Amino acid sequence: MTESLVPSPVIAVTAQTPAAVASAVRLATELRLSLLTDPPAFGLTHLLTLTGDRLELRELGPAAPGPVYVDFVAGTAAHRRRFGGGRGQPLARAVGLKGNAAPTVVDATAGLGRDAFVLACLGCTVQLLERSPIMAALLHDGLRRARQDSELGSLVAARLSLELADGQDWLRRLAPERQPDVIYLDPMYPHRRKTALVGKEMRLLRQVAGADPDAPALLEVALGCARRRVVVKRPRLAPPLVGPPPTLHITAPNTRFDVYLLQRG
């Protein structure tokens, strides 16, 4: 089945605890989604569930995976922050983190925010842009909880900010004096048939946010806006985005960073 034939998700908001009902009502209103107060209605494919602790995206169905949520304090993000390789890791080298450099970064395809969080922990100030309201809600919830953490709160508050916006539109409106040093793009990867290569987060992200057929156009806008470089994250064996060739590539086991160095003035 081609991606264009995959039906659109049908999503509702629900609260798992009585204390979360008021927040669920506000979220459903903001996202213009139905508020579910009874068992899942026929035809729903996903639920945005407010638990007592966090916001989760849950796929419905007998073979559905576990929930997806944003957590910068524990789990994968915490492990990557402590053991990810610091400024020597491929992401940091792609963005240009040498010495004490702390560039400003716009992550124009924020998704679950994991790479942006790593960059913030390494000293960057990152503006996250996410055009999917569902993904932005999950990311907003993760940032809110991270700001409450005694260890990470001040860092997250100072270095990470989120805006629900289309990357192309946002960058086009950006005043020249606010242009970032780096623009980071992680467009939706091409569809893979090998399910082992598609984790539940990527699958749900694809279902809810859709593909990124306009990624080449976003790259074009980014190249005209960044001060120093544009970085595009790709599968290691995938072709570069349509457009000018990258200046250099930085590879990891499953990922490749295409780096476009810019000369201004």
Image: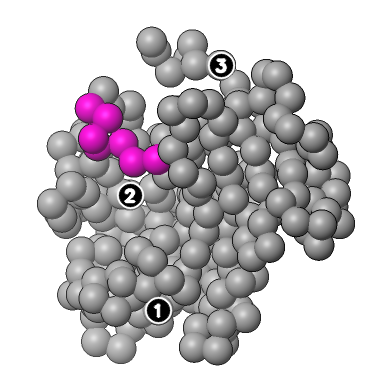
Q: Is residue 184 left or right of residue 44?
A: left
Q: Under tag 2, what secondary structure?
A: strand
**Residue 61 in sight here:** yes
Residue 176 marker: none
- Nearer the observer: mark 1 or 3; the answer is 3
Start-end of magenta stretch: 194-200
Could you tell me which residue is drawn at 51 percent across and 30 percent down? 207
Callout 2: 10 Å neighbours few (<14), some, many (20+)? many
Could you tell me which residue is drawn at 42 percent across and 61 percent down? 114
Q: Are marks 1 and 3 in contact (CB under 8 Å)?
A: no
- Nearer the observer: mark 3 or 2; the answer is 3
**Residue 262 in sight here:** no
Q: Under tag 1, what secondary structure?
A: helix
Q: Is residue 205 left or right of residue 11?
A: left
Could you tell me which residue is drawn at 49 percent across and 88 percent down? 151
Residue 121 marker: 1
Q: Under tag 3, what secondary structure?
A: loop
Which of the marked residues, 1 or 2, is nearer the chain's N terminus?
A: 1
Query: Which of the 4 image quadrants contains residue 81?
Result: bottom left
Q: Nearer the viewer, residue 194 or 231?
A: 194
| Residue type pointed to by label 1 | Cys
Q: Is residue 197 magenta?
A: yes
Q: Mark 1 and mark 3: span between their CA atoms?
A: 38 Å
Q: Is residue 25 left or right of residue 195?
A: right
**Can you identify the residue that label 2 sits on?**
232
Residue 7 marker: 3
